[in-house]
């Protein structure tokens, strides 16, 4: 279960961390770091959703639920609707994540939180894959550009908005996450991000399962395994109760139940110092 304190830290990360992307189509606003930094902080006593069933946890749903709660309480924004589906008969045309009023105008906010690992030429958007290899950066980005952020111009969406007396003035992409580079690139501070990425995006590293122990076994580094409930805000000292050695992480990787990509934080007594993925050979075979 996510603690109330953790939920507030996650929400602050959702609001104030650098965006993942700041370049897109002319019809859409891709907010920069400064816009996100200006967003009002949530009230310390604001009740936030805390997922109660870890085995059914969906990170994207958690991200949207935190934003929904913050928007509903915001003094600067008025939430007109959330997760508003557009239908054409029985067919779902799309969904408005958020319809938000600000300064007398209405915006469609499309929310996304994504984590991608770069392979090959990392300047190419098509070479970035999620821990689930079916999720690819270029596919998501192009879908945002061509479909999701254009929803307000669809005739069925226009009809629905007219019934609700809503006119969408613009779309805004509220996209957060991290990019993970091959560890050699990351260590050498020589990362080559894709062109659309925000220059200050949060970043980490990744290693193949066979390269993990050689990189860490004699360094004395300690790790925390990160289930999806811990993928957003960084760990603090209080989160690190029983850190694992590199050998213990290797055992997790080799477990028959292990996922194709294992997410870990490298930690000290003071907190988190980096984040990375260790990927199974099957993951690499799928993306190469």
Image: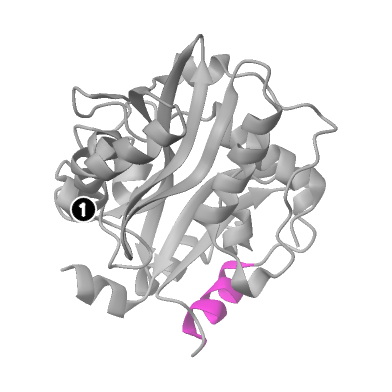
The span shown in magenta is: 245-255
Find out whether residue 250 is within the magenta segment. yes
Quarter location, residue 222? bottom right
SS under mark 1: helix
User: Outermost residue toward the front?
Assistant: 163
| Crowd tier of the residue under label 1, counting other residues whose Cα lies within 10 Å: few below 14, some 14–19, many 20 or above | some
The image shows residue 209, relative to residue 89, as above or below, that is below
Q: Which residue is mark 1?
A: 139
Decide if residue 192 is in sight here.
Answer: no
The image shows residue 149, relative to residue 183, as above or below, that is above
- Please name whichever residue, 197 or 62, is drawn nearer the observer in this view of the structure: 62
Q: Is residue 85 left or right of residue 50?
A: left
User: Outermost residue toward the right?
Assistant: 45
Residue at screen point 67% across, 46% down? 235
Q: Is residue 160 left or right of residue 46?
A: left
Q: Main secondary structure of the magenta part?
A: helix
Residue 21 at x, y = what percent? Answer: 32, 33
Find out whether residue 29 is within the magenta segment. no
């Amino acid at each position: 279960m996510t603690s109330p304190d953790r939920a507030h830290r996650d929400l602050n990360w959702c609001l104030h961390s650098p965006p993942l992307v700041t370049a897109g189509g002319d019809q859409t606003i891709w907010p920069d770091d400064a816009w996100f930094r200006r967003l009002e902080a949530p009230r310390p006593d604001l009740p936030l959703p805390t997922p109660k069933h870890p085995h059914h946890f969906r990170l994207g749903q958690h991200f949207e639920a935190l934003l929904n709660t913050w928007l509903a309480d915001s003094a600067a924004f008025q939430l007109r609707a959330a997760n508003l589906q557009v239908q054409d008969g029985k067919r779902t045309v799309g969904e408005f994540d958020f319809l938000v009023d600000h300064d007398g105008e209405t915006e469609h906010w499309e929310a996304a939180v994504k984590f991608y690992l770069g392979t090959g030429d990392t300047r190419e958007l098509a070479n970035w894959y999620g821990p689930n290899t079916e999720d690819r950066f270029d596919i998501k980005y192009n879908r945002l550009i061509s479909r999701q952020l254009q929803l307000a111009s669809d005739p069925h969406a226009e009809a629905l908005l007219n019934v609700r007396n809503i006119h969408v003035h613009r779309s805004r992409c509220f996209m957060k996450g991290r990019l993970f580079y091959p560890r050699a690139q990351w260590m050498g501070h020589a990362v080559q991000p894709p062109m659309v990425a925000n220059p200050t995006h949060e970043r980490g590293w990744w290693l193949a399962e066979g390269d993990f122990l050689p990189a860490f076994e004699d360094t004395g580094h300690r790790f925390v395994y990160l289930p999806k409930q811990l993928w957003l805000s960084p760990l603090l000292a209080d989160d690190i109760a029983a850190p694992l050695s590199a050998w213990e992480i290797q055992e997790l990787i080799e477990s028959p139940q292990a996922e194709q990509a294992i997410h870990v934080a490298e930690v000290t007594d003071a907190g988190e110092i980096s984040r990375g993925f260790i990927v199974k050979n099957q993951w690499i075979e799928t993306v190469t």
